[in-house]
Amino acid sequence: CSSGLFHSLFPTHRVQASNMAENVETFIAFTGAPADQAAMFLEMAGGNVETAVEIYLSSQEGGGGDVPMADVQVPAAEVSAGGAEVPPWWNVIWPAREAPPEAWLLQRLDGGTGDSWKGGIPQPKNGPCGVLAVVHALVLAEQHSRTVAEVELSAEAVAKALSDIIVRCRPEEGGSIRLCRPKQKGQYGPEVELEISDFPDAAAAAAEIKARIADFQGPGGIIDLVYSAVFTRGIDLVRQEACSEGGELPLVPKAFNCWLCSMELMSLLLRGTAQGNVGAFRADGSPNTAWEGFNTVGILSRKEKETGIPIAEALKNPKCPVWILHGGDHFTTAWAQSATPADVGAKFTLHFWNGLPPGGPRLAELAVTAVKGAIPSGPQAAPKFYKPEPGEIDEVVQADQEDKKSFPGQYRKWRYEVMLAWDRPDLQGEPRPADEPPEPKYDQEDPRYQRDGPWRCRLCYDRRFQTMDFSLVPADSPDSCAKCSKPRKECGWSLWIPFAELPPKRQATVMDQHSEKIEPILWTKWPQAEVQATDGGRLPDC
């Protein structure tokens, strides 16, 4: 069950774009890095995605979040290295023939101690954040109307969440519910036998989960939860579901030395099936309605901004105002005490929890102003790439470095270097329909947007990855480019346009690039909303 990378979050649904845009999206999907960093590392690597990712990873010193949600899979041959036998179910769940790492073995499912918030799950090490976010979100679904001081991860609350997860995994109503744990307590290697107990109904299983809750909340409990969900669903069915629509196994893949949570695993825990597509469309382009009725809590993802493919409507509009936030490299939770308004200009409060250092453990209160309201309910159109017409902005190159120094973090006050589109027979794309609002067009020679001194040739910039030449045309050659031997008026040059004069779509793009990480995630539900931490500090990391 092998397919292209990153299909578990959004299945194959091709959106035509330039090679650079596609490379940026692929880089971001691997690393979770912001778009401006993606472009920078790609330029360093001459446009080669694999080399750019290697350079990026070698530059990191551990970071502050789980490494990207694993769509990079380990081949089955590695699971049974050396020819040693493993249980037939092992490589459905795990990526290597060894006991899970401490991030999984020692993780607990209870609240913080000391000064940490008692209603949040601390996460000491990278890896199982997806499982923790699902459990925490389901607990919050029952308690979101309480004040944060009243939210509790009691044995009863966690037992109910776990019972709901496991019972929902039955292939059919009335099917057997299976609770699993190792026969040797605390031993989770592939050689250890499992104790599997069958229960005929939900009430009996719930009672046993409550009796075992100390074990579920203690070290190894999240592994018992995963095993119980998988065996209740059935190994063969999990394998079949996970490999549909471009998904892959194992449920817990390994990437960058961490054992991570795939979206197939998240889906199994949230709705009882291992089909991991959370996008608004199925692989054939039809609407993805599979989450309807299974949206007690929702999901908002940075991947929507990076790929242009929205999250399924049911997940954006869950039954309870509780969302799992996917930041590209980590899962956190956010919730409101009551339903959030959809009106333009509406103000409301969100609460946020991140259990992972160094950004957490942190409980934050966020004041949100929905300046454009909420994304309306209803069918969402698949994104389309329209071939840009001459005079439209083809690409935003960068923000003005002096503006960034003068107005740190205030991206609405910056000017941006842009390239205008020109007639390109080699670039394919649908013509813009007559009823589609046109993009603004700019005059290449508009005096408001010119800059003296060295200038960037449009044709050479377009070919920079082939030539590996990223230099500007020197100021002493104002009328022609020596590199492409074209007159300046023929090859074109970059303009510098203030944020306020960019088209709305380009404004949204630069906001995504330069905002705090949590903002673009929330903008997938409340476009361009103003978000502030009520304590006056920095917005939380997610």
Image: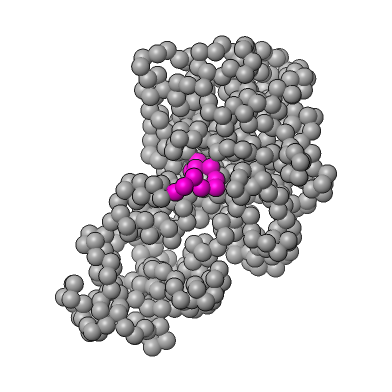
View extreme (bottom): residue? 447
View extreme (left): residue? 485
Residue at left 34%, top 85%? Answer: 452
Which residue occupies the foreground of this view, 531 or 172?
531
Residue at left 71%, top 50%? Answer: 363
Residue 126 visible in rendering: yes
Residue at left 59%, top 55%? Answer: 518
Which residue occupies the foreground of this view, 122 or 446?
122
- Principal SS element in the magenta part? loop
In this picture, residue 463 sits left or right of residue 134:
left
Residue 184 placement: quadrant: top right
Reply above or below: 239 against 262: above
Tell me where residue 285 appears, x and y as whole percent. Answer: 46, 46
In this picture, residue 35 sits left or right of residue 19:
right
Tell me where residue 299 appears, x and y as whole percent. Answer: 61, 46
Magenta-highlighted residues:
60-69
Residue 288 visible in rendering: no
Which residue occupies the foreground of this view, 124 or 351?
124
Picture colour scheme: one colour
Residue at left 25%, top 76%? Answer: 473
Reply above or below: 405 against 40: below
In this picture, residue 143 sits left or right of residue 40:
right
Q: Is 138 one of the magenta-colored residues?
A: no
